[in-house]
Image: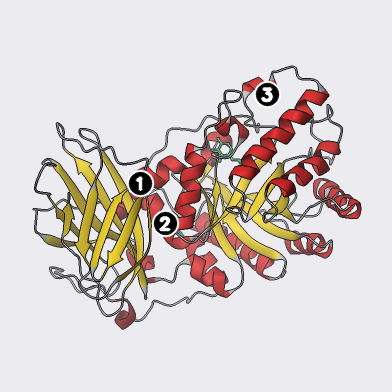
Amino acid sequence: MRQLFTRRAVRLRNAAVAVTVLASTALGAALLPGAAQAADTPLRDLAAAKGVYVGNAVAGGKLSGTPAYAAIAGAQFNSLTPENAMKWGSVESTRGSLNWAEADQIVAFAQAHNQQVRGHTLVWHSQNPNWLTNGGFSATELNTILQQHIAAEAGRYAGKIYAWDVLNELFNEDGTYRTSVWYPALGTGFIANSLNWARQADPAAKLYINDYNVEGIGAKSDALYNLVKSLKAQGAPIDGVGLQAHFILGQVPSTLQANIQRFADLGVDVAITELDIRMQTPSTDAKLTQQAADYTTVVKACLAVSRCKGITGWDISDADSWVPSVFSGYGAATLYDEGYQPKPAYRAVATALGGSTTSPSPTATASPSPTATATPTTTATPTATATPTGGTGGCSATYSVPNQWNTGFSGNVVVACAAGSSLSNWKVSWDFGAGQQLTQAWNATCTQTGTRVTCTNAAWNGTVGSGGSTSFGFNANWSGSNPVPAVTLG
Ligand code: XIL
């Protein structure tokens, strides 16, 4: 089943950031359904206060192409794992021809957001290039190929990766070693070898072995436990164990915390690396409530063991999740629904991380906008658009605030061209009128001088074709008020 999966067509509804296109100098406000979370403290801040990280798997195309996805990825998480971009089949589908574009993009996004990166994954049986799987290589050749791969990939990102899933999914369910391109051809020696090669290439990265169905105590996790113990005894560089945690509703193992603890007691870190909790679709309120309880159980188990370093979710929203395409009849496994609205599970994770369970006070979260007609305490989402003058007629930039909390907010700017117009590079600027201060940006290079913010395209999104669009995002601080600026393109 865990072969190269074809992703289902992604169904995206960007409701959370529906952009209102207005006349060139107009300002407006829109109320978003379910935007009450916009005033909440982001998960990343809650996690940091507890001494853990909270991450998610991401795809480069969505970071640059789906504004709601990028806004959540940037604002809510302080760790990212490339969902597919660092897998061997992604980086070297043709032997000797290395393609780092998406992995580079994700690392750049993470750096721009002050996020750490979990590298995933260097050695696996799945999502390998055909030339490797079907190459008929001898053991000696395989050994050299593996060494070179690890040196190249871990070397490229040396110093930029918090932790590498060096080895992924080594075991069968009964605890025997999985047959793969590596085993039994290379015996079990490739395991310590891979760790040593990764250490040489990136001495700063924590080196993990990652697997699924090892979250509770059982034959498979016993095998992993014994492997880690023996690697430690040999002096091999093993720093951590990743528990993927692809769970089924109501079936979080009762031994999860005890299992995390026994690995910690071996002297390694532990992380929840790919958490999702799937249910038979359609979802119901009762199932979503159960799911929230299950997420709480997982977060609490990690927080209870000091060597449990963090929790990574697998896919931002139910629209992005790998689950429906792989587990027939199942879905709704993530923290956000298909419209990028937070689910009960999001609230449960925030609460388990120490977040407030009551609504924030209106004074701390008011989001005034010059033309807001209602006076919501937390849900006003300003949007503004400016049609440029000069040589870019037919293209426009539209500013919105998909997420705002008590001291900060995430902004999003869509650069779009009507049919017949295009841009080969772009610059968007505005003045922050109430002391707002930019802290980070992604998919653009942004600087703030005084009140003036100027953003230019990133290397990969300067071209906006006829009828096309791209977007970038940023985080900024605010206090008092957060009025919408007029933006200029050009
Ligand atoms: C999955 C991705 O989410 C999918 O997009 C891809 O088609 C298949 O792989 N265990 C892992 C992850 O270690 O790399 C897998 O990710 C999910 C299971």
Expressed as whole percent of the image width and height from the top left, the position of residue 284 reads: 47, 53
| Color encoding of the figure | secondary structure
* Mark 1 closeness class: few <14, some 14–19, many ≥20 residues within 10 Å: some
Specify the amino acid type for callout 3. Leu
* Of the pair 448 and 481, the residue shown nearer to us: 448
Judge by depth and name the residue closer to the eye, 456 or 72: 456
In which quarter of the view is residue 26 placed?
bottom left
Dividing the image into 4 quarters, which one contains the N terminus? top right
Report if the CB atoms under discs 3 and 2 are less than 8 Å apart. no
Asked whether mark 1 lies closer than 8 Å to ligand 1, one says no
- Say which amino acid is labelled 2: Ile
On screen, 394 above or below 75?
Answer: above
Q: Earlier in the sequence, mark 3 or mark 2?
A: 2
How packed mark 3 is, by other alpha carbons closer than 10 Å (few <14, some 14-19, many 20 or more), is: some
Closer to viewer: mark 3 or mark 2: 3
Q: Earlier in the sequence, mark 1 or mark 2?
A: 2
Residue 437 sits above or below residue 95 on the image: below
Q: Is residue 133 above or below residue 487?
A: above
- Which residue is at 56% across, 61% downward? 54
Q: Residues within 10 Å of mark 2 (few under 14, many from 20)?
A: many
Ligand 1 shown in quarter: top right
Q: Residue at x 32, y 57 (%)?
A: 446
Q: Circle 2 is placed at which residue position?
A: 72
Q: Name the residue tied to disc 1.
A: 458
Query: SS for tag 3?
Result: helix
Residue at (40%, 50%) from the top-left corner? 69
Relative side of 174 to 338, left or right:
right
Q: Are marks 1 and 3 in contact (CB under 8 Å)?
A: no
Inspect the image, locate mark 1, and give the three-letter code of the amino acid beneath it: Ala
Circle 3 residue: 132
